[in-house]
Image (cartoon, grey):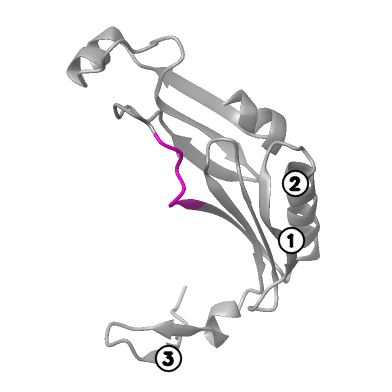
């Protein structure tokens, strides 16, 4: 998790290692208990991220998931924070930028990168009312604008 602290500026890191009893319960073969995490987490830009090691026989990078950090495009301070965060991570040399942080279809900004563990990250600045103008596919596969729901 030090990677996320160094590159992303993560805070509030915590980690619970795998115990010998848990390793037996999960039938882990020759686990490195000191470096294995059964539950961990950290905060990135105010969002709590929870994580654990993959205990499959042949762990693979997580290419089919994404974590989205969402910012309010109507708040200029949040837009600046999002831009600074994206620039920090993108310029670290320790991620692969897949889409630069630029104008997006919903009138905000969006950028994407993949970290060293294969996790895809999306940094998104959307206007507060973006969903009112976005077509959504409903259960019957028709496209309709999303309706506001009371808060």
Q: Residues within 10 Å of mark 3 (few under 14, many from 20)?
A: few
Quarter holding residue 44:
top right
Residue 139 within the segment the image draws in magenta: no
Mark 2, secondary structure of its residue: helix
Q: Are marks 2 and 1 in contact (CB under 8 Å)?
A: yes
Q: Residue at x 69, y 78 (%)?
A: 107
Q: Where does residue 11 sit, x and y in percent of width and height?
A: 64, 32
Residue bearing the label numbered 2: 90
Q: Is residue 72 left or right of 21 when viewed as pictured? A: right
First to last magenta residue range: 60-66
Q: Is residue 1 above or below residue 143?
A: above
Badge 2 or badge 1: first in the primary sequence: 2
Total numbered circles: 3
Q: Residues within 10 Å of mark 2 (few under 14, many from 20)?
A: many
Residue bearing the label numbered 1: 101
Residue bearing the label numbered 3: 144
Q: Residue at x 59, y 29 (%)?
A: 12
Q: Where does residue 56 sit, x and y in percent of width and height?
A: 30, 30
Q: Choose mark 3 or mark 1, whichever is in front.
A: 1
Q: Residue at x 63, y 78 (%)?
A: 106
């Amino acid at each position: 998790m030090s990677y996320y602290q160094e590159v992303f500026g993560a805070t509030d890191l915590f980690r619970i290692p795998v115990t010998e009893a848990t390793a037996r319960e999960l039938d882990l073969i020759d686990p490195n208990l000191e470096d294995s995490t059964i539950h961990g987490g950290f905060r990135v830009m105010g969002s709590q991220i929870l994580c654990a090691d993959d205990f499959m026989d042949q762990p693979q990078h997580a290419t089919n998931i994404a974590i989205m950090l969402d910012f309010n495009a109507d708040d200029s301070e949040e837009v600046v924070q999002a831009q600074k965060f994206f620039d920090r991570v993108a310029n670290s040399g320790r991620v692969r930028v897949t889409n630069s942080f630029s104008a997006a279809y919903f009138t905000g900004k969006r950028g994407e990168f993949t970290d060293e563990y294969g996790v895809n990250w999306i940094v998104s600045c959307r206007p507060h009312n973006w969903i009112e103008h976005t077509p959504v596919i409903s259960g019957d596969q028709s496209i309709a604008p999303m309706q506001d729901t009371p808060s």
